[in-house]
Image (cartoon, rainbow, N blue to C red):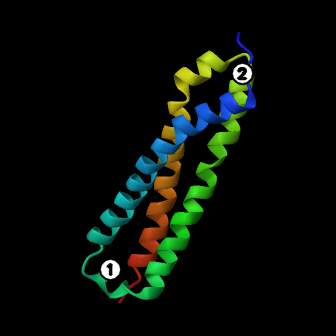
Amino acid sequence: MNEATVRDVLTDAIRYWEPRRIAYNVILLAVVVVVFALQWPQSGSALSVDLAQTLFILAVLANVPYCAAYVVDAVAQYSGFQAVWKRYRWLLFLVGVVFASIIARFFAIGMFSHAA
């Protein structure tokens, strides 16, 4: 096994995870939009500057745990399982997206179902 440098590992992690961050955010946005549409017209009354600010804060907060993938990725790449990890790290992305989507759905339901 080649000894990877910190620079190599971080470059590989950025190259892998950052393009997927776009998909992650688009999926979470789609979850919120679907919940909003399903709650229409009740959800329309929730539209406000406060809601926009809340959604912005939640979007930023949703990206904080996404960054945890870098820690897992770096540790796995420095282990003896680097080749296996690189082949299956998409599973971490999938589990993270599903988990975040469930949380986003609960938040969206809470924000839009009580609007009146």
- At horizontal 66% and vertical 28% (from top left) the residue drawn is 8
The answer to whether the residue labelled 2 contacts the one labelled 1, judged by CB atoms less than 8 Å apart, is: no
Q: Nearer the viewer, residue 11 or 19?
A: 11
- At horizontal 74% and vertical 26% (from top left) the residue drawn is 5
Q: Nearer the viewer, residue 83 or 97?
A: 83
Which residue is labeled 2 in the image? Answer: 4
Residue 112 numbered tag: none
Tally the marks. Answer: 2
Q: Is residue 84 above or below residue 74?
A: above
Q: Is residue 90 above or below residue 43?
A: above
For label 1, the crowd category at 10 Å Cα-Cα, with few meaning under 14, some 14 to 19 and many 20 or more, is many
- At horizontal 70% and vertical 40% (from top left) the residue drawn is 71
Q: Residue furthest top?
A: 1
Q: Element at badge 1?
A: helix
Q: Is residue 101 above or below residue 53?
A: above
Disc 2 from disc 1: Cα separation = 51 Å
Q: Nearer the viewer, residue 12 or 93?
A: 12
Going from N to C along the chain, the mark reached first, 2 or 1, is 2
Q: Nearer the viewer, residue 106 or 49?
A: 49
For label 2, the crowd category at 10 Å Cα-Cα, with few meaning under 14, some 14 to 19 and many 20 or more, is few
Which residue is labeled 1 in the image? Answer: 43
Q: Element at badge 2?
A: loop
Q: Position of residue 87 (x, y in %)?
A: 53, 21
Q: In what quadrant of the picture does the N terminus appear?
A: top right
Q: Position of residue 32 (x, y in %)?
A: 38, 65
Label 1 sits on what residue type?
A: Ser
Label 2 sits on what residue type?
A: Ala
Q: Nearer the viewer, mark 2 or mark 1?
A: 2
87 to the left or right of 115: right
